[in-house]
Amino acid sequence: MSDEEHHFESKGDAGASKTYPQQAGAIRKNGYIVIKNRPCKVVEVSTSKTGKHGHAKCHFVGIDIFNGKKLEDIVPSSHNCDVPHVTRTDYQLIDISEDGFVSLLTENGNTKDDLRLPTDDNLLSQIKDGFGDGKDLVVTVMSSMGEEQICALKDIGPK
């Protein structure tokens, strides 16, 4: 064997895939699916009967989990679909900057400063009002396919 060293570029994510395959017929309502390279929550699934060439087809209607757009896809039920890895993490809100970014406290005590305020007006006003009132807020951040967004808010009492 050779004695030379192997050098690998560090990607930071240990090469973990953003999606995993799942048979189209096994994906249910309220699950997740990738439609047009966007992670979506499935809101409607309908299956058509087998046709002349023998494939039942699944018709998926999904809502993009980050921008709320409705997307549709039709896939043969025997084929594999991509399902995104969706994770939710809670962080404590430390600060809101003037340029629309939030400063969050992670579980290990570090700060996370690369997230924008949500685009949802209702959630946005709740975060700003609660922070302005000096409440201790915990935000839930949903991340999938390399994107992250604040999706929920919890009040854990006054500071």
Image: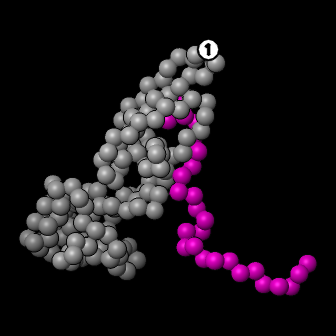
**What residue is drawn where x is 57% and y is 58%?**
17
Tell me residue 18's x, y (percent): 53, 57
- Left or right of 21, for residue 107: left
Magenta-highlighted stretch: main secondary structure? Answer: loop
Tell me residue 91's x, y (percent): 31, 68
- Left or right of 34, for residue 157: left
Magenta segment includes 25? yes
Examine the image and state in which quarter residue 81 appears.
top right
Query: Residue 99 versus residue 107: which sits nearer the camera?
Result: 99
Tell me residue 22's x, y (percent): 57, 41
Look at the numbered disc 1 and give the secondary structure of its residue.
loop
Residue 82's place in the image compared with 112, above or below, is: above
Q: Amino acid at mark 1?
A: Lys
User: Which residue range is magenta in the image?
Assistant: 1-27
Q: Quadrant of the C terminus?
A: bottom left
**What residue is drawn where x is 47% and y is 50%?**
37
- Left or right of 3, for residue 28: left
Magenta segment includes 114? no
Query: Residue 28 versus residue 148: which sits nearer the camera?
Result: 148
Examine the image and state in which quarter residue 117 appears.
bottom left
Tell me residue 49's x, y (percent): 53, 16
Residue 58's place in the image compared with 97, above or below, is: above
**What residue is drawn where x is 27% and y is 63%?**
139
Residue sitting at the far top: 52
